[in-house]
Amino acid sequence: MAATNTQPAETANNSGTRLLIIDDDRALCRLIRDYLEPLGYEVAAAYNGPDGLQRALHEPWSAVILDVMLPGMNGFEVLKHLRAQSSVPVLMLTARGEEADRIAGLEVGADDYLPKTFSTRELLARLRAVTRRAAAPPKADQAAAAEIVVGPLRLNPGSRRAVLGDKPLELTALEFDLLAALARSRGRVKSREELVEVVAERNYDVFDRSVDVHIWSLRKKLGDDPKRPRFIRTFRSVGYMLINPDFE
């Protein structure tokens, strides 16, 4: 990690939050553990793909931090097997920070990603966001909210299901939140800053590129071509807008 291991001003109680790190970099695992345990996290580590998968499947975790490059089984394979049986939130680590790795992780079912140059503040912010999103029950007003319909796209906020035509969309919790935010503002541009707040549940500029990658993943799942968009239109240097393909 690029940043020094200094404790943040936030000291919210995270008692009962169990975190599994699957990474063969033992020094990094220790650094994350030493940073998070004083904040109330219970942190364990596995140092290869097969062991990490077994622990992820057979023990209760609040979240998993999963490296891409692992001995025995790479992170994408681990995630694919894990997603067949579990919806535990997963943060992917990419050593090279390549967008292709990030997109591949999101497509397989990662909830978010981090390059290995992440700061401790960024790690904590993303970790809290994915665990809070996964653990929170639907709000009463959200559960009762009407279905959002944009052309052939239907979103149910209560069940958090998305359907395109008659085909269910396999979206991560974060992708659903982004798509719902765009759908509620259909026909109006949502700035990256507004979407960052959906992703991170706070105004935190470091997430700007994360929003772009998640939008890329959403487009692929929607079968949308960014050059000739049917659903998500880009407004350069501004943000994104969901359009109704029936009226375009």
Image (cartoon, rainbow, N blue to C red):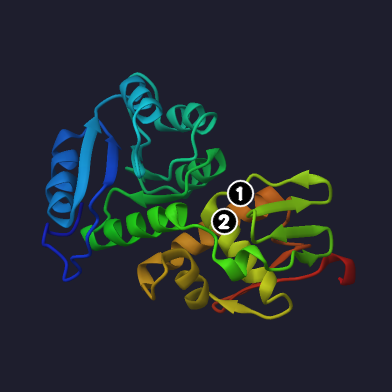
Q: Amino acid at mark 2?
A: Glu
Give yes or no for contact between labels 1 and 2 (Cβ–Cβ under 8 Å).
yes
Left/right of residue 33 with respect to residue 21 in the rendered view:
left
Residue 106: x and y in percent read 52, 45
Residue drawn where x is 64% and y is 53% of the image: 159
Identify the residue position indicated by label 1 in the image.
171
**Can you tell which quarter of the image residue 107 is in?**
top right
Instruction: Check the image and report above or below for 188 versus 19.
Output: below
- The picture places residue 126, in percent across and down from the top left corner, at 36, 58
**Left or right relative to 126: residue 138:** right
Rendered position, 26 above or below 238: above
Q: Residue at x 70, y 53 (%)?
A: 162
**Neighbour tally class for label 2: few under 14, some 14-19, many 20 plus, Cα within 10 Å:** many
Task: Give the CA separation, mark 1 to mark 2.
Answer: 6 Å
Work out whether residue 100 or residue 219 is closer to the camera in this orientation and state it.
Answer: 219
Q: Is residue 109 above or below residue 178?
A: above
Q: Which residue is mark 2?
A: 175
Tag 1, which secondary structure?
loop
Q: Residue at the location (73% across, 56% down)?
A: 225
Q: Secondary structure at mark 2?
A: helix
Q: How far across and how far down the image is residue 35, in percent?
A: 15, 52
